[in-house]
Image (spheres, rainbow, N blue to C red):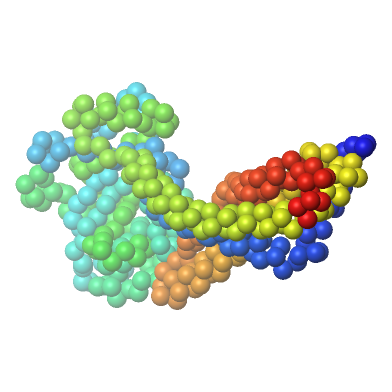
Amino acid sequence: MLNHKLKFHELIILSLRTFKTKPQRAFLTIMGMSVGIATVLLLVSLGYGFQYILIGKLMTTEDSLVTMEVSYPSESNLLIKKDTLDLLKNSLDVAEVSPIAEFPGEIRIDGTTGGLLIDTRIVEPSYFRLAGLLPDIGTIPTEENPGLVSSSQMLVPINLTVDESSLNKLLNFKIFYQDQISMVADEADSTAPVPIKGIITDDSISPTAIIFNNTLSKEPPFYSKALVKAQSIEVIEKLRDRLLGEGYLVSARIDLVNQARKITNIITIILGVFGVTALVVSAIGMFNTMLVGFLERIYEVGILKSLGATDSDVRNLFLVEASIMGFLGGAGGILIGFGIGKILNYVLSLVATRFGGKAIDLFVSPIWFIFLILGFSIVIGFVSGWWPAHRAAGLSPKEAFTKK
């Protein structure tokens, strides 16, 4: 008996015969696999969506990741003054320093006489970039396009609405510079009416205005805190430890990001475990299909071997068939999971925008994970077909015809 090894395209053609002879069984097996893959994709995408939303809230700009908020403990009675800022700017591993002064103030819309007592945050133009603070409405002011960012609670008492119609409204300021025992030491006025460039819609923030120090007639005598940007992410921990040793209180956003990433990774893993449970059930169904297919095709195996097919040909035939089913199940699961995720994102964004919020993507599917899960589905198909393929390869023509 001559052995003629089957070519790859011949294996493909023979493997596809089962989709013609048993179309319903093949379809149901592929759909079962697709449901398992879609479940994994949806649940893991939900975990990644939580991660991106949470970390996106913490890290809105690249510079904010390597920036620390530095201040003195309240019990130390120490203040950040210009000489302190100079020392920070000249420190090793420091790329940039942006001071922040916080004082009470009075605000008045241009052309009116009444004033509103507010909290003022006096900053430099680099503040928004280093703090990662972005207004919900409008844009951040710049040196070329100066202005202020207001909290929503500041607008209502001066008869301004919390929407785009309040942008570019002109406001006048009076800042009360106070010493450590809250006695008025000096005052500063706005050198010209300041336009509103951005609005923060968080109602939990008290009436607050964030303004540039160059819009005031006098600079602050001291600062409550400073934003310190490290040269790189590699030196941020060393810089933080050194600042702590110098008596500063230090808050690094990267700590929050790392903690948030750990929490969301745990959530993603837990969701993935639930998804894998559904995938295991689908894999068992595929194994059962391949086993039944082997038992039904014992006579066919005998004919193939009688015609000269080798053990590896028979084994490869079953393995290719199982791998094709796994691939189709994975591709179908990705289409189903990705499609359902897109639909749910659209519905959630529609509801969020209708209630005044922002559009959100709660289901996020990284490209690498899609390719990974597609490859994993092929592996599942291959593994499910291994035992039936091994059994088929071990049959002799005589055994096959006898069992038939």
Image side of residue 179 versus residue 205, left or right = left
Give the percent coordinates (x, y) of residue 308. 89, 41
Give the percent coordinates (x, y) of residue 389. 71, 45
Residue 175 visible, this orientation: yes
Residue at the location (37% across, 41% down)? 258
Residue at the location (78% across, 38% down)? 312
Give the percent coordinates (x, y) of residue 261. 39, 45
Q: Could you say which quadrant of the image residue 3 lies in?
A: top right
Quadrant in which the N terminus is drawn:
top right
Residue 374 visible, this orientation: no
Image side of residue 364 versus residue 298, left or right = left
Image side of residue 214 versus residue 176, left or right = right
Q: Could you say which quadrant of the image residue 80 lies in?
A: top left
Residue at the location (41% across, 47% down)? 265
Across the whole image, how many numbered discs are drawn on residues? 0
Give the percent coordinates (x, y) of residue 193. 34, 61
The correct choice, above or below, for 65 with respect to 51 in the image is: above
Residue closer to the observer: 121 or 114 = 121
Residue farthest to the right?
A: 2
Residue closer to the observer: 185 or 43 = 43
Residue at the location (51% across, 58% down)? 278
Residue closer to the observer: 106 or 380 = 380
Quadrant in which the C terminus is drawn:
bottom right
Image side of residue 393 versus residue 219, left or right = right
Residue closer to the observer: 113 or 104 = 104
